Amino acid sequence: MGNRAFFILKEKGETSYFTAYHGANALSPLLRLVQAKKLQAQLPGQKSIAHIFEHLDYDGKYQQERLMDADMFFCPVSSAGMKACMKNYKEHSQFEMRFILDLDDNLIQMEYNPNCPWYRTMGVYSLDLDVGLDNVRKLLAYAEERGITDFGRLLSIYHNSTGLAEKLDAARYSMRVEEYLKSPQAQEDRERYWRMFGRQENLEGETDEDGDEMEEHY
């Protein structure tokens, strides 16, 4: 099962749209942009980032001819297709995150889909794009020094260094609380509490009555 996201790329006044089957995390958009910019400097001609995204595989390599969609990180989407993605995003949890990469205004915006219970409290984050890219380049240099190649470890380091780890933990805790409150166990606990509360009230009532009787005898 993937963790799907969609991407809106703004570049030299043009807007391009992509989806990614394994793209719903804070590191992927910046990492892929770092890879694309490196390729842009190496490839002949003036290839756009949008073009390179369309030809970028999971290993960060440029494929002259697109491989099967399952082997490419990004899947290009038409304007009409993106409207359908956005509608789905607003109503369902199929797409877990949405990204805007604005190369013209030096901005990245990422939004966690509140329809996903595990992201309900996460919200929207924005960052200067050059700052985000610099952070990822530092992360990659750190990983190279220590021989770290696993993406999961890179993502964990990135989450910890940006403070997102605490926010994600809090969101998951909120989800567990919400799930519990809706569970049969919570209903049983509530009923047990009210039964105990009712018995306590009865006991207090009986104690008050006993006290009144003792006062009458005196």
Image (cartoon, rainbow, N blue to C red):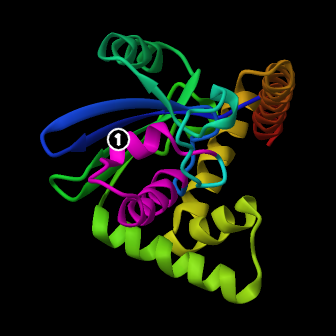
Which residue: 25% across, 55% down? Answer: 107
User: Is residue 90 shown left or right of residue 131?
Assistant: right
Which quadrant is the N terminus positioned in?
A: top right
Q: Residue furthest left?
A: 13
SS under mark 1: helix
The image quarter containing residue 182 is top right
Question: Is 70 drawn above or below residue 140 in the view shown?
Answer: above
Above-or-below relation of 46 to 184: below
Q: Residue at x 86, y 29 (%)?
A: 196
Above-or-below relation of 145 to 124 = below
**Numbered range of the magenta stretch:** 28-57
**4 and 178: which one is in front?**
4
On screen, residue 149 above or below 179: below
Q: Amino acid at mark 1?
A: Ala
Q: Residue 172 lies in what quarter of the image?
A: top right
Q: Position of residue 205 (x, y in %)?
A: 77, 28
- Residue 48 lies within the magenta run: yes
Q: How many discs appear?
A: 1
- The answer to whether residue 123 of the structure is visible from this angle is no
Q: Is residue 62 visible?
A: yes
Q: Quadrant of residue 194?
A: top right
Q: Residues within 10 Å of mark 1 (few under 14, many from 20)?
A: many
Q: In this orientation, which residue lies closer to the viewer: 166 or 77?
A: 77
> Residue 11 colored magenta?
no
Quadrant placement of the C terminus? top right
Residue 165 coordinates in the image, percent (x, y): 60, 62
Direction front: furthest residue: 44
Looking at the picture, how far across and down is residue 46, in whole percent? 26, 53
| Nearest to the observer: residue 188 or residue 105 | 105
| Residue 66 in the figure: left or right of residue 196 | left
Q: Is residue 74 left or right of residue 180?
A: left
Residue beneath disc 1: 50
